[in-house]
Amino acid sequence: MTTNSFDEAHFSVISENIKRIKNEIAEATIKSSRSIDDVRLMAVTKTVCVEYINHAIENCGIDLIGENKVQEFLSKKDFLNLTNVEKHLIGHLQTNKVKKIVGEVDMIQSVDSFRVAQSISNEAYKADITANVLLEINIGDEDSKTGFDKVEFQESLNQISLLPNIKVKGLMTIPPICDNSLELENYFDRMCCYYNEIKEANYPNFDFEILSMGMSGDYKEAILHGSNLVRVGSAIFGARIYN
Ligand SMILES: *Cc1c(COP(=O)(O)O)cnc(C)c1O
């Protein structure tokens, strides 16, 4: 079974996966003493064919999707039933692609440098809109990952807060692969601390309401440690096959 090719039988698998994941999200949300609608489920649709994505939207109540690549999103979007569906970009964004994506998605979760933030604000200004963004933090300080490192991040906050045409809605992260759950929970806790600190600092143009962390392997732990938006791909659609 690949997620690229279309197969009728896979529709019911997707339905079952989403039902199970929604239940698990509800359990984790209640366990962390929050109201049941506090945590949003994003279906991550990279490499997934439009038939499966539309099934998730039309029959399984998915109202938030995430794509990694500008080009992939733009080539799929006309074939998707996106009425009442929020679209987020979650993959690394090069400055030369900013122009193409601003105005096309409801949020860019993967702002990982001041330059990209500035470029988004410039394009949003030209389009006469305010672009919603999250700042991506490289919480494990890994060379292989995009995202702000801690020092860069602290230095950039003031500058970013002065950009006129973006609204910073929160933080996003992909933690390192961890050997044990304690280590992983530590990263989530650290993110949650950053999130609360910045939220309370009341920067101009910041309106913190989203802490985006948790993927197929760790969304329950992420919720228990403060996430309110989980990005789930393979647990919904099956393993990805990259062409
Ligand atoms: C691919 C991806 C996900 C989803 O990963 P799964 O492990 O398949 O759930 C989430 N967030 C980002 C940024 C991704 O690139």
Image (cartoon, helix red, strand yellow):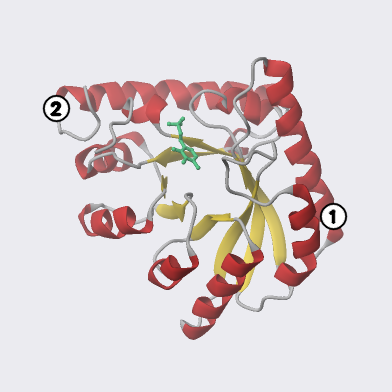
Q: Residue lying farthest top?
A: 180
Residue at position x 68%, y 24% from top? 184
Which of the two residues, 108 or 79, is positioned nearer the viewer here?
108
Task: Count numbered badges in the picture.
Answer: 2
Circle 2 residues within 10 Å: few <14, some 14–19, many ≥20: few
Q: Position of residue 218 (x, y in %)?
A: 57, 24
Which of the two residues, 58 or 163, is positioned nearer the viewer here?
163
Residue at disc 1, secondary structure: helix
Q: CA distance from mark 2 to mark 1?
A: 49 Å
State the residue position of label 2: 8
Task: Determine which of the numbered discs, if any, sits on residue 200 in the image.
Answer: 1
The disc, 2 or 1, on the residue closer to the chain's N-terminal end is 2
* Image quarter of the C terminus: top left
Circle 1 residues within 10 Å: few <14, some 14–19, many ≥20: few
Which of the two residues, 37 or 13, is positioned nearer the viewer here?
13
User: Against 176, is 72 above or below?
Assistant: below
Q: As drawn, is 44 to the left or to the right of 23?
A: left
One can see residue 173 in this view: yes
Q: Position of residue 108 (x, y in %)?
A: 52, 58
Residue at disc 2, secondary structure: loop
Residue type at mark 1? Glu
Residue at position x 71%, y 49% from top? 149
Which of the two residues, 7 or 58, is positioned nearer the viewer here?
7
Q: Residue lying farthest front?
A: 143
Q: Position of residue 152 (x, y in %)?
A: 75, 56
* Image quarter of the N terminus: top left
User: Against 169, is 158 above or below?
Assistant: below
Q: Position of residue 127 (x, y in %)?
A: 46, 81
Label 2 within 8 A of ligand 1 by Cβ: no
